Amino acid sequence: MYDRAKTAVKTHEGQTESFPITIGLHQGSSLCPYLFALVMDELTGHIQDDIPWCMLFVDNIVLIDETQEGINAKLNLWREVLESKDLHLSRSKT
């Protein structure tokens, strides 16, 4: 699908020469939401409870608990799961 895909970067000094894209998806690809859902389903399968105290929507995660300590515990669990797969939680948005 992306065989021999190339791109260039436009900067204030002009445009770079084209270079190959070897990983990732094109921005706006219709595959992005589907692949994100597959990855999140795999990552969260073992940390979801019967009652959905953790809700996923597009690229947002909502954690719900009765106490601040419970939220922090869930947040730490998420961080551990993500980091085990070399992914990182954006703390500036939490």
Image: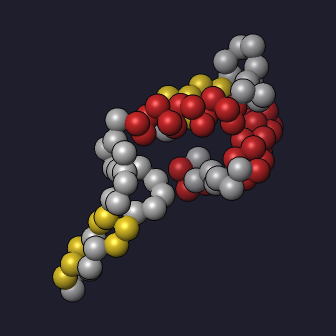
User: Where residue 54 sits: x, y (%)?
Assistant: 65, 26
**In the displayed structure, would residue 11 be above or below residue 70?**
below
* Relative to 26, 76 lies left or right: right
* Relative to 78, 6 lies left or right: left
Q: Name which quarter of the figure residue 61 lies in.
A: top right
**In the displayed structure, would residue 86 be above or below residue 55?**
below
Residue at horizontal 42 percent and vertical 39 percent from the top: 32
Q: Residue furthest top?
A: 50
* Relative to 46, 28 lies left or right: left
Nearer to us in this view, 15 or 74: 15
Residue at horizontal 37 percent and vertical 54 percent from the top: 3
Q: Name which quarter of the figure residue 51 lies in.
A: top right
User: Where residue 58 sits: x, y (%)?
Assistant: 46, 33
Q: Is residue 28 visible?
A: yes
Nearer to us in this view, 23 or 47: 23
**In the displayed structure, would residue 14 be above or below residue 80?**
below
Nearer to us in this view, 3 or 38: 3
User: Where residue 25 sits: x, y (%)?
Assistant: 41, 49
- The number of numbered badges drawn on the structure is 0
Residue at horizontal 37 percent and vertical 45 percent from the top: 1
Figure coloring: secondary structure
**In the displayed structure, would residue 85 be above or below residue 34?**
below
User: Where residue 29 sits: x, y (%)?
Assistant: 34, 42
Residue at horizontal 53 percent and vertical 50 percent from the top: 93
Q: Residue furthest bottom?
A: 13
Q: Is residue 11 visible?
A: no
* Relative to 67, 36 lies left or right: left
